[in-house]
Amino acid sequence: MKFERTHRIEPNFNYASLTDIVLQLLIFFLLSSSFVSSPGIKVALPKAQASEIQADRQTVITITHGGKLYLNSDEVTTATLAQRLIPVLDKDRNQVVIIRADQEVSLQKAVEVIDIAKGVGAQKFMIATEPVDE
């Protein structure tokens, strides 16, 4: 005795749920990328016509208006900067060291920081700027 199936499975694929998921992911990434900002150290960066964003393989050294130094988000001094920078650069010698100096900081202070970084093996440097408001 052979019974017939009353509910047949149709081999059609419904793309509506896949489209919903992809659109939700797109909205999530668009919204979350607008919340990404630089570390919480407030610095008035100098203005420049040509600014570019470099996101991969980077180490940020911040020099505040008061002369404080930060390696990524950790406060350091000029004496301890080299010691703290060595393990960071040992992971990847080709990473970019970005100098985020306040526009009121003297050029001499920025050059001292670059010399310290060069002394421990940094090879690539960038100076962070903000785009000019038009």
Image: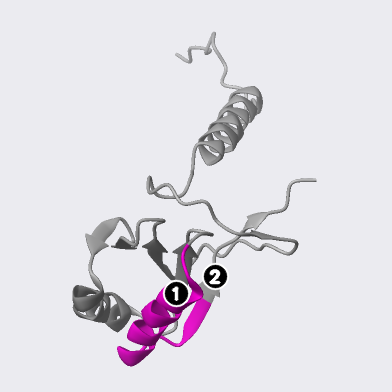
- Quarter the C terminus occupies: top right
Residue 121 in percent (x, y) is at 35, 90
Residue 118 in percent (x, y) is at 38, 88
Marks 1 and 2: which is nearer the front?
1
The answer to whether mark 1 and mark 2 are in CB contact below 8 A is yes
Q: Which residues are magenta?
A: 105-125
Q: Magenta span has 117?
A: yes
Which residue is at 30% across, 55% downward?
Answer: 73
Q: Earlier in the sequence, mark 1 or mark 2?
A: 1
Which residue is at 74% across, 46% downward?
Answer: 133
Residue 130 in percent (x, y) is at 62, 55
As drawn, 125 above or below 50: below
Which residue is at 57% across, 17% downward?
Answer: 8
Residue 110 tag number: 1
As shown in the figure, which amino acid type bears the numbered disc 1?
Answer: Ala
Label 1 sits on a secondary structure element that is helix
Residue 127 tag number: 2
Q: Magenta span has 43?
A: no
